[in-house]
Amino acid sequence: MSTTDSKTEVGSYFISNYPPYSQWTVDALPTVEKTLGSAPKPDTPLGLYLHIPFCRKRCKFCYFKVFTDVKAPEVQRYVDALCSEIEMVSQLPVMGERPFRFVYFGGGTPSFLSPKQLTALSERLHRHITWDGAEEVTFECEPGTLSETKVKTLRETLGVTRLSLGVENFTDSVLEENGRAHLSKQVYAAWEWIQEANFNNVNIDLISGMVGETWDNWKYNIEKVIELSPESVTIYQMELPFNTVYSKDILGNKIETPVADWPTKRAWVAYAFEELKKVGYSVSSAYTMIKDPNKISFSYRDNLWRGSDLLATGIASFGHAQGVHYQNLPGMEQYLGAIEEGRLPLGRGFQPTEHQMLIREMVLLLKKGVLDVDYFRQKFGVDVIDRWRDVWQGYADEGLLSFNESQVELTMDGLLRADSLLPAFFEPEHQGVRYT
């Protein structure tokens, strides 16, 4: 996506890794297996990702591997497989003697599981691993799946420290149009339980550009989120990856995109950031505002963007070990079958070069708004200013950033367009290819 695009076209713009996922292959699996079977490099932080792929409904903008209308035995079979996979992962040499620095329960909807299932899951997992000393345990929640008992279970039994609540919008008509399973009254009910549970960090997710959003509606969303006053607010600009309900309708029925254009979405996020700044929030990334930078961090993001290891568990989940990328099998029967046969459910991978590792960290860390040039000199022996001086200068001329020999800093306009800036740093063979 160029920095001048206006209309929201079908395609993935959000950059979460490098090289692009479309370049990952089955051929790289021997390298993945060798890496997982080797001792880790000293001092590399370790994280764990657990994928719970179930949802009450599939949102019309969702592109993740999720399953709806599942029966209790199917859920139990999956949870059993996940626990078995974690038992296998706990015995891998790549674990070393390292504790988990961060743990992330993602989805799907992890809060789809009942309090009883969550308690049983925690007990089984703790037979093989522990995250008692982790600096962060994140758990994604859909408001309509929560109850007072479940929230207490997350805090007291699973030890969740960072709860991320997928609100997306506070207006019922917008939620219904976009296929969300919850309504606004469930957000407010859940919020009371969450506040009583006293989590270290509660994040609220919003989406700029949902179908049906208007300026008035967006201002109402920001007013409401300020009233709730979470520790952090994350705002994503709506995109249209290929496999969403909306994208299939646009491509199949040749309809006009119902999603707001990029200038409108950027204007809404800019408004949100300004209003949040007025009440004391600070910019943490291109998507996130936090209330107190001295107390609130996002360990999962910050460690992963700096090249930490992330052991992936669950169907279709993405991992990263000693620089090597991998993804688990994407089919449910494939995944379950591998686990039940006692095999790791590895699906594909990618062995990046040292230069590609540098690019990955640079483009991800740039999304935080400020890039420390010396960090890359020390870690990779490369001066990223010299290496991409023409690109930096071009973006500076457009008013998207400023730079000197020690730092790059995005302007607000650059921050709002961060993902569209990053492909310019990709290697030539990765520019213009499908991202996912």
Image: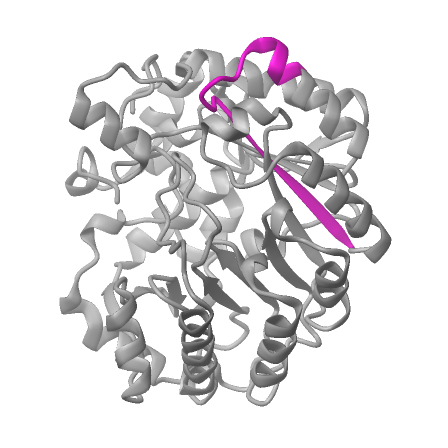
Q: Quadrant of residue 288?
A: top right
Q: Residue visible at 39% across and 64% down?
A: 319
Q: Residue at x 36, y 66 (%)?
A: 315
Q: Height in image: 132 above or below 58?
A: below
Q: Nearer the viewer, residue 38 or 16?
A: 16
Name the spot of residue 105 as percent of width and height, x first: 55, 62
How many labels were placed on the picture? 0
Left or right: residue 364 compared with residue 4:
right
Q: How is the image coloured?
A: one colour
**Location of residue 42 in the rendering, given as x and y in whole percent from the top left corner:** 51, 77
Instruction: Tell me if residue 345 is in the magenta stretch.
Output: no
Is residue 213 covered in magenta?
A: yes
Q: Is residue 223 left or right of residue 81?
A: right
Quarter the N terminus occupies: top left
If the image is split into quadrants, where does the C terminus sit?
top left
For the residue pair 81 and 115, the one nearer the viewer reads as 115
**Residue 410 visible (yes or no):** no
Q: Residue at x 45, y 45 (%)?
A: 57
Q: Residue 419, percent across and down?
A: 40, 32
Q: Does residue 184 appear anywhere in the picture? A: yes
Q: Position of residue 13 (x, y in %)?
A: 34, 33
The relative height of residue 154 versus residue 210 in the rendered view (above or below) is below
The residue at 59%/17% (across/down) is 270
In the image, residue 291 sits, relative to residue 201, either above or below, namely: above
In this rendering, the answer to whether 329 lies above or below 5 is below
Q: Which residues are magenta?
A: 200-219
For the residue pair 233 and 240, the one nearer the viewer reads as 240
| Drawn side of residue 229 relative to residue 391, left or right | right
